[in-house]
Structure formats: C-alpha cells, structure tokens
Image (spheres, rainbow, N blue to C red):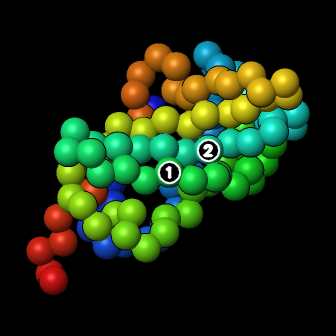
C-alpha cells in the first residue's frame, strides 16, 4: 500500500482504501466491524471505525476527526476487520500502510 500524505491539521480528504487479499479484493459483506488505527514512534495515535463504502470490493474510508492530524510525522497504520465469531484480520498483512502528516508551514 502506498503512503497516504496530508497536511497537518487537515481533515479532508478522508483516507480511502481498498482491502486486498493478495490480488483479490476482500468481500466485507460478512464483516462485523472495520477499524482504523495509526501511531507514530512518539506515541501519538488515531483510531476509530471505518465506513464501508462498497462491501463487495473491499472499499473503506476513514474520516479524520479534530486533533488526529495535529502532529506532523510518519505514522504506521493498520485496518482491522472483525469477522463473525470475533475473528480478527489485519490489513495490510504484508507491508505496513504509512500515513505522512506534513508540517503546515503556512500557520
């Protein structure tokens, strides 16, 4: 997955991802929950539920909330899908998703 970049303090655009299992999109039709989490090496974190935009093609979105993009830096991020019976699956499974919050030099 590529690095997602936004400017410090921005809440738009949302983070939109397609969850993949190898080369195939993950069908989220049976998913109980989809949650986003990111953290940097200094301990700043953001997490919360993701919106499923298209369950059959694995398209999800995370809408930033106030304060979550306040800290510039590089964050490692994951998406956790909970399947029936409480069975978790984490994406991406091979390479870490990164979110880069660029310092806002205009403020």
Could you tell me which secondary element the residue under label 1 belongs to?
strand
Horizontal side of 41 relative to 62 (left or right) equals left
For the N terminus, the image quarter is top left
Is tag 1's residue or tag 2's residue first in the polypeptide sequence? 2
Q: How many residues crowd mark 1 within 10 Å: few (<14), some (14–19), many (20+)?
A: some
Could you tell me which secondary element the residue under label 2 belongs to?
strand
Determine if residue 2 is in view: no
In this rendering, the answer to whether 50 lies above or below 3 is below
Tell which of 23 and 51 is nearer to you: 51
Residue 28, image x and y in percent?
A: 79, 36
Structural distance between the alpha carbons of marks 1 and 2: 7 Å
Residue carrying label 2? 35
In this rendering, the answer to whether 64 lies above or below 99 is below
Query: Measuring 31% from the left and 72% from the top, which residue is drawn there?
Result: 9
For the C terminus, the image quarter is bottom left
Residue 86, image x and y in percent?
A: 77, 27
Query: Measuring 20% from the left and 45% from the top, which residue is drawn there?
Result: 42
- Marks 1,2: beta carbons within 8 A: yes
Toward the left, the furthest residue is 105
Residue 40, image x and y in percent?
A: 27, 43
Tell which of 97 and 81 is nearer to you: 81
Q: How many residues crowd mark 2 within 10 Å: few (<14), some (14–19), many (20+)?
A: some
Query: Measuring 68% from the left and 33% from the top, which residue is drawn there?
Result: 81
Tell which of 23 and 73 is nearer to you: 73
């Amino acid at each position: 997955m590529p690095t997602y970049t936004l400017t410090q303090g921005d809440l738009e655009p949302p983070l939109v991802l397609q969850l993949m299992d190898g080369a195939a999109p993950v069908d989220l039709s049976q998913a109980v929950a989809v949650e986003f989490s990111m953290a940097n090496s200094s301990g700043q974190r953001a997490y919360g539920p993701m919106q499923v935009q298209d369950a059959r093609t694995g398209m999800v979105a995370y809408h930033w909330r106030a304060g979550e993009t306040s800290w510039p830096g590089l964050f490692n991020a994951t998406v956790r899908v909970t399947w029936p019976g409480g069975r978790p699956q984490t994406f991406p499974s091979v390479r870490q998703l990164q979110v880069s919050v660029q310092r806002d030099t205009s403020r």
